Image: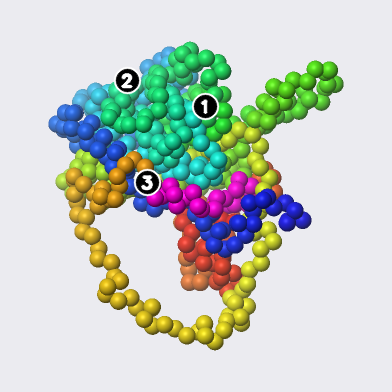
Amino acid sequence: MAAALLPEMAPRLLTPETLRTAAKQSQGIHLVPLSLRRAIKRYLRDQDKAHMNRKVLMLSASFDRAKGTGAELAAAATRSALLDDPNAPSGAEQRAARWKVRSAYGDTGLRYREDETVAYVASRMPAIHAACHRVLREVRRRLPEFAPAKVLDFGAGPSSALWAMRAVWPKSIERVNLVEPSKEMQRAGQSLLDNLRGLPLIHSYDSIQELNRNIEKHERGHDLVISSYALGEIPSLNDRITIVRQLWDLTSDVLVLLEPGTPQGAKIISQMRSYILWMEKRRCRKIEKSSNRPPSNRKDIVSQEASLKNGSFVVAPCPHDGKCPLENSDKYCHFVQRLQRTSSQRVYKRSKGVPLRGFEDEKFCYVALRRGKRPEEAWPLDGMKFETLKERRAKRKPEDLIIDYEEQFPSEEDEEVPVDVGDSLVSYASDEHELSLFHDSEEAEEEQTIHADLGGGWGRIIYSPIRRGKQVQMDVCRATKRDASEGVFERVVVTQSKNPTLHFQARRSLWGDLWPF
C-alpha cells in the first residue's frame, strides 16, 4: 500500500544519502553580502558619526523597554491615540525614546527618528537580513517551483527583507510594494538601494490602506507577502489580527511572518498561525455547506477554480497544521542563525571599549503559510529497511577490515593553513571570493539537491540535539496523522546499535533541520 502512495519523485528520497540532503535546512555562518556591507558603509559615511555608540545603546534600551511594557501598552491601547511608554526615562533619553503611533484601521508602527534609523542600520540590519535570508532560503527549498514575481514587504524598515529576497530569488521578482510608516526608514532603504543594478519596480507606502487606495482591486494579490520584526511593535492583539487578516487577503500564494526569537515573539507567531488556519478552515466549511445545496443549471467555472485556493497549510517550520504542542508549556519554538559581524557592527556595538566577537547569533521565530491544501505525500521512511549494527558487521568482508594508515594521518602538504583574519574594520576574508550580491556556486549546488516534500512525514528538530556516547537525543515536533492535521512534541532517541544509518544522520543534524518518519 505504501508503494502505491509514492509520487513519481519519491524513489529519489528512499536512500540514506538523499534523506540527509533533504533534511538539511539549517545554514552555517551567514556572510552578509558584499554589496550590502558596502551600502551600509556608504550610508553611514554620509551620516553624522558623533555619539554613534551612544545612539546604538539607546536604541537597544528602547527595545528592552518595549518588551517590558508590551502588556501595559496593550491594555491602554486606543485607536488614533499616541501611546507614551510609562517606563520611559526623563531628560535626554526620553527625547530619544520611540513612541508607538496608532493610525486608522489598526495599522500600527513605531516612529523612528533619523538618529534611531542610523543606529538601526548600523547595528540591527545585518542580523535581520541574516534571519530573513535563512527563512526565505528554506521556503525556496521546500517549494522549489515557487518563484515570486510580485512581493509585499510589510514593516519594511530599511529594506532588510528586500535584500534577502533578491539573494534568494534573483531573477523572478519583478515588483515590490513596501509598507513602512516611518519616513526616515523609507529614506534609509532608498539610500541603501542606490547604485544597485537590476532592481525590480519598487513602490513605498505609509500604510496598507494607502496601498489599497493606489492599486487596482485585481492587482492586490501578491505571490509573496512577508512581515519581518513588525508585528511585535503592535501592542494590541486585536490590531495584530487585523493586520494579519489584511496581509492574508493580499496574499495569493505564500505568507511569511518573522519575529524575534523571544517568548513574546513565539507567542505572536503561534497566535497568528492559529488564527489563519482557523479562519481558512471556517471558510472551507462555509463553502462545503453551500456546495451541498441543489446545484443550479449554470456552472460557475471561476468559483470552481477559486475553491482550489481555499484553505491553508504550514510550509515551515511546523510539519503539521494542528494545535502547537508547545502552547501553554514552559518551552517556545524558536531558531538561531549565526552571522559574521560587519565592520559597522564591530565599531558601534562595542561595550565599554571591549571588542566584540567576530560573529553573533540572531534568534528568531517564524511561520510560512501557503494557500490551498497540503499535498498528500508518502512518508520518507515508508518501505525502507535498516540494518542493525550487528547485521552490518556480519556482512563485512575481510578486506574491509584492512586499515590504510596513510589515509588516517594526513601529510603536512594536505593540512590547511589557517588564515588570520583579525579584527578588520574595512574588509573580510570573504570579500575576495564574493563578487556580487548573489552566491552563484551556492545556487548551482542547491539546484541539484533533493528537496523534502510537504507531507507530514518530516518532523522538525527543536533545540540542539544531545549527543551522549553512541546515542543521540532530539526534541522533534512531528505530525501524528497522515494528513498532518495533528502534531506532537516528543523526544526521539537514535542509537548506533539499532540503526547505524539514522544514527549517522542524527549525529550530523542541527537545530532547525528536518527528521524523517
The reply to whether dot 1 and dot 3 touch (C-beta < 8 Å) is no
Question: Callout 1, which amino acid?
Answer: His
- Local secondary structure at mark 3: loop
The reply to whether dot 1 and dot 2 touch (C-beta < 8 Å) is no
Q: Quadrant of residue 128?
A: top left
Local packing at callout 3 (Cα closer than 10 Å; few below 14, some 14-19, many 20+) is some
Residue extent of the magenta highlight: 440-461
**Total of numbered circles in the picture?**
3
- Residue at numbered disc 1: 222
Question: Callout 3, which amino acid?
Answer: His
Residue 362 covered by magenta stretch: no
Horizontal relation, residue 154 to residue 1: left or right: left
Viewer-side residue, 206 vs 407 = 407
Viewer-side residue, 44 vs 348 = 44
Q: Quadrant of residue 408?
A: bottom left
Tell me the residue at 27%/23% (across/down). Answer: 113
- Residue at numbered disc 2: 183
Q: Could you say where residue 215 lies in the image, as x and y percent from the top left?
A: 49, 15
* Coloring basis for residues: rainbow
Q: Could you say where residue 199 lies in the image, as x and y percent from the top left?
A: 37, 29
Tell me the residue at 57%/50% (across/down). Answer: 452
Question: Mark 1 and mark 3: span between their CA atoms?
Answer: 26 Å
Question: Callout 2, which amino acid?
Answer: Lys
Q: Residue furthest left?
A: 50
- Local secondary structure at mark 1: strand
- Local secondary structure at mark 2: helix
Mark earlier in primary sequence (3, 2): 2
